């Protein structure tokens, strides 16, 4: 853009010649006309070239007063550092030969508006005044002492002051270099093209703070800023960087007003305590405001609660923590890297009132530092290219006029071995280097205090984020069959898996089966063993006394078949409890219904034979067909074959195999989940396998009912009847128990035990009612085990009929007795009689 030269050598960008410039020019003319040639309370050093200086020699004053108490570190120390640097340059014959640097140093009083008024002194020499109408009393033209021309300005300290002054100095193209202003907006070289600084901007400092917060494991922090560019822009930079990095949430962002009162600091502490978990507090505030915050925390009895992270305005200064040491313990502070110059220490400590008269504020500093009174006007009313200077560090600027980001990190500590003070705990030079082991915390804590919105979830819990606050969450357990997939989600384990104890992964569901030592197995096994022993004993007895009348009268062939079925009913208990495999599953299919089928097929054949014999005898003296032992065995075998045929068809359609049933014991509590190793036999298939045997049992029961009137002297129909009635009751009880427990978690144990016990009871009832009395007679009353005389078939049937009829008339006799006489008119030795005689032993079966 074209540049215009205006006034006395003032160069302006044409677009900037606006009302702002007019206002500035007017203010300058007014200032020139009204103020003294040299502004009061300033330092002036003569030289060939004059440098301006802006320092916060005094703090901000109370309302109505521009300046307050003197500031030692930020004011006097830095001012003397400039004076020392000028002395060193002027005494060096090679650095600036034949050129002496002078200075014009002003006090900003830590206030931007006051600093603006003072800094107008720097541009007075660049303003051409119209003095044509000014005359002395003697008529001669006036003599004006032209102010010295300032070629550059050192300062200011506060960013708000530097911003205000920079807007004026750039209009007159006066370069400005700050030693402490860190506001990020000063990096804008389009607006502040004549501004540079030897300290890094707050964007670096804010990044260092973000890195510190993360290194501490904190994710929930509050921010407090002094009103103005430094505090507000610094906090804005921290907010932006924390959002970009993620994982940090701002609990509260509070501001300290310019004209603050004690109540303002107390209110800030109250607000910070509303989010008690946000113990870490980021402070972008002046040292005066920092002191006010610490004081307020002490008044609120919250010493040690807050974890302060102070910006470079706190740094390693003593003034913010003086007499507030306990409230500052554990505070982490940031300070731009700097080196100690031994020569300056010697220079400053040698300054006295006699040898330092050029510093117009040194007397006031002397009074403050030594708590004394020097004069009547004293405020003390009572007392008791790259180049290097002297430290050897490089001085350079980037294209925005900023120094690189290099910081030392300090923590304010109090320990028993030394006095309170700042300890260097690390540094930040684009990356964080922090010695956490050197850090100390309030109340003697050894672990890093927490400053988090929510505590970490336990293992096996997921985070459920709070809406609008990503650092806050609720912990929800992964329940059921879910495991913790990541921090925020749970996933369901596969069908055959269950969560491990801490729910971080899945593990196979344990496989169980009915164990031999289980109470569910002990009882049926015990009953089965007793039954097997009893059955073997009966079979052995029958074999031993095979030719005796009682054994023959019992129908030896069918008795052995029946005893075999009873034996298989007991044996099935061991097959049902054994560990399932293909062989065991095959045996289960075969023997599950076979024992009952054999037993009830034999009983059905017996009861059917009795029924046919006595029904045929009512109308004929000829014996029925198919009542011989061979015929009976053939009938029984055919009935058993139907069961075996069904089993073989089942084998062909669905070969036996083992399965692991995870649904049977998959309870809501995953810790109790078990996979059940079992044969692939469904409840319906079990009932179908038993269904044929149950049909035989029901049919046999019907025949037992039909033959209930036959006298027990002639047959064993009544014991068979009692056996079948009891068996029906057992199986009627079995069905609801078996199906009623289908949804039970212990289905395997209940159903298996119920089935085995029902089989044992059925076998025991038949064994006890049909064979134990015979064995008792055979062993203990052998005198009763004798041959009965033979009678004719007609006589036997007639006797049975008469006995039945007479039994109904017994109550009509006085003595309740009935007599029956059987007359034998046929010679039993004749051939005709032999055809009509039926052995008693053939009838009584």
Image: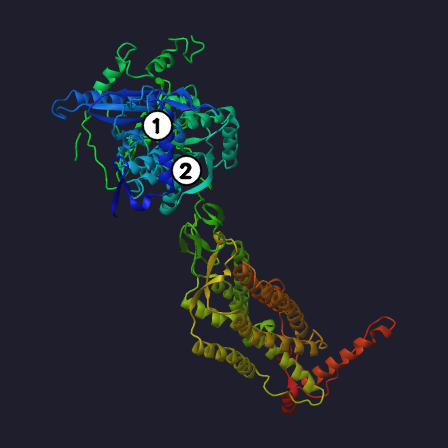
Image vertical order of residue 579 relative to residue 424, above or below: below
**Whole-percent x and y of residue 679?**
46, 67
Nearest the camera: 288 or 457? 288
**Whole-percent x and y of residue 826?**
70, 88
**Whole-percent x and y of residue 520?**
54, 56
The quarter holding residue 194 reads: top left
Q: Which residue lies furthest to the bottom in this view?
A: 832
**Whole-percent x and y of residue 180?**
31, 30
Mark 1 closeness class: few <14, some 14–19, many ≥20 residues within 10 Å: some
Nearest the camera: 417 or 296? 296
Image vertical order of residue 144 relative to residue 165, above or below: above
Q: Is mark 2 on a helix, strand or loop?
A: helix
| Rendered residue at 35%/35% (across/down) | 25
Judged by depth in the image, the label closer to the viewer, 1 or 2, is 1
Total label count?
2
Image vertical order of residue 212 relative to residue 543, above or below: above
Q: Which residue lies furthest to the front in this view?
A: 139
Q: Which colour scheme is used?
A: rainbow
The quarter holding residue 235 reads: top left
Mark 2 closeness class: few <14, some 14–19, many ≥20 residues within 10 Å: many
Q: Which residue in the structure is indicated by mark 1?
A: 32
Whichever of callouts 1 and 2 sits on the residue coming sooner in the sequence is: 1
């Amino acid at each position: 853009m074209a540049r215009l030269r205006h006034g006395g050598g003032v160069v302006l960008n044409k677009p900037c010649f606006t009302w702002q410039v007019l206002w500035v020019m007017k203010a300058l003319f007014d200032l020139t006309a009204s103020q003294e040639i040299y502004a009061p309370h300033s330092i002036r050093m003569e030289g060939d070239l004059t440098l301006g200086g802006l320092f916060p020699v005094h703090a901000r004053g109370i309302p109505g007063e521009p300046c307050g108490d003197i500031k030692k570190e930020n004011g006097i120390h830095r001012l003397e550092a400039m004076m020392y640097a000028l002395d060193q340059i002027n005494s060096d014959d090679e650095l600036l030969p034949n050129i002496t640097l002078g200075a014009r140093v002003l006090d900003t009083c830590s206030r931007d508006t006051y600093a603006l008024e003072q800094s107008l002194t720097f541009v007075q020499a660049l303003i051409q005044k119209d003095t044509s109408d000014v005359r002395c009393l003697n008529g001669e033209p006036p003599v004006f002492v032209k102010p010295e021309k300032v070629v550059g300005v050192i300062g200011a300290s506060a960013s708000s002051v530097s911003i205000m002054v920079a807007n004026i100095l750039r209009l007159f193209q006066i370069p400005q270099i700050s030693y402490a202003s860190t506001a990020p907006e000063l990096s804008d070289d389009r607006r502040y093209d004549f501004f540079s600084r030897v300290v890094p901007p707050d964007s670096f400092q804010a990044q260092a703070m973000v890195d510190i917060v993360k290194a501490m494991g904190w994710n929930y922090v509050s921010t407090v800023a002094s009103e103005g560019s430094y505090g507000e822009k610094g906090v804005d930079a921290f907010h932006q960087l924390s959002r970009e990095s993620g994982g940090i949430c701002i609990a509260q962002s509070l501001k300290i007003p310019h004209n603050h009162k004690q109540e303002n600091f107390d209110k800030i502490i109250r607000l910070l305590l509303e989010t008690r978990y946000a113990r870490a507090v980021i402070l972008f505030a002046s040292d005066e405001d920092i002191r006010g915050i610490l004081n307020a925390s002490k008044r609120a009895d919250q010493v040690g609660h807050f974890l302060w992270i102070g910006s470079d305005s706190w740094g390693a200064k003593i003034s913010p923590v003086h007499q507030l040491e306990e409230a500052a313990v554990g505070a982490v502070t940031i300070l731009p890297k700097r080196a100690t110059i031994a020569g300056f220490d010697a220079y400053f400590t040698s300054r006295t009132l006699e040898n330092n008269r050029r510093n117009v504020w040194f007397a006031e500093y002397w009074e403050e530092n030594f708590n004394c009174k020097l004069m009547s006007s004293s405020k003390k009313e009572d007392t008791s290219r790259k180049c290097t200077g002297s430290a050897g560090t490089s001085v350079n600027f980037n294209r925005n006029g900023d120094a690189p980001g290099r910081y030392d990190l300090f923590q304010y500590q109090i320990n028993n071995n030394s006095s309170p003070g700042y300890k260097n705990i690390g540094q930040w030079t684009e990356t964080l280097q922090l010695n956490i082991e050197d850090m100390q915390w309030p109340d003697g804590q050894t672990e890093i205090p927490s400053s988090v919105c929510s505590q970490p979830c336990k293992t096996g819990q997921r985070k459920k984020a709070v809406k609008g606050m990503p650092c806050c969450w609720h912990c929800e357990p992964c329940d059921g069959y879910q495991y913790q997939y990541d921090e925020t989600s749970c996933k369901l384990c596969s069908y055959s898996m269950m969560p491990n104890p801490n729910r971080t992964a899945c593990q196979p569901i344990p496989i169980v089966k009915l164990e031999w030592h289980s109470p569910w197995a002990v009882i049926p096994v015990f009953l089965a063993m007793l039954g097997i022993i009893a059955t073997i004993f009966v079979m052995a007895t029958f074999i031993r006394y095979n030719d005796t009348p009682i054994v023959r009268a019992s129908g030896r062939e069918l008795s052995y078949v029946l005893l075999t079925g009873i034996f298989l009913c007991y044996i099935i208990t061991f097959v049902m409890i054994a560990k399932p495999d293909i062989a065991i599953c095959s045996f289960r299919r075969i023997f599950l219904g076979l024992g009952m089928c054999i037993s009830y097929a034999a009983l059905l054949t017996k009861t059917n034979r009795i029924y046919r014999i006595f029904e045929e005898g009512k109308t004929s003296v000829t014996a029925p067909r198919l009542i011989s032992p061979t015929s009976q065995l053939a009938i029984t075998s055919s009935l058993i074959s139907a069961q075996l045929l069904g089993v073989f068809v089942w084998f062909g359609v669905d070969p036996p195999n083992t399965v692991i049933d995870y649904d049977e014991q998959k309870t809501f509590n995953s810790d109790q989940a078990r996979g059940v190793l079992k044969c692939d036999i469904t409840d319906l298939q079990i009932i179908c396998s038993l269904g044929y045997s149950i049909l035989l049992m029901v049919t046999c029961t019907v025949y037992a009912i039909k033959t209930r009137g036959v006298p027990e002297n002639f047959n064993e129909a009544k014991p068979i009847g009692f056996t079948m009635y009891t068996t029906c009751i057992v199986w009627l009880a079995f069905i609801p128990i078996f199906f009623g427990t289908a949804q039970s978690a212990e289905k395997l144990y209940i159903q298996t035990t119920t089935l085995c016990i029902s089989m044992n009871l059925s076998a025991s009832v038949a064994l006890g009612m049909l064979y134990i009395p015979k064995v008792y007679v055979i062993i203990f009353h052998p005198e009763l085990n004798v041959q009965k005389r033979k009678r004719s078939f007609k006589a036997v049937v007639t006797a049975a009929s008469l006995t039945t009829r007479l039994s109904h008339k017994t109550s009509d006799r006085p003595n309740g007795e009935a007599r029956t006489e059987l007359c034998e008119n046929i010679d039993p030795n004749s051939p005709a009689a032999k055809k009509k005689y039926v052995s008693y032993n053939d009838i009584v079966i």
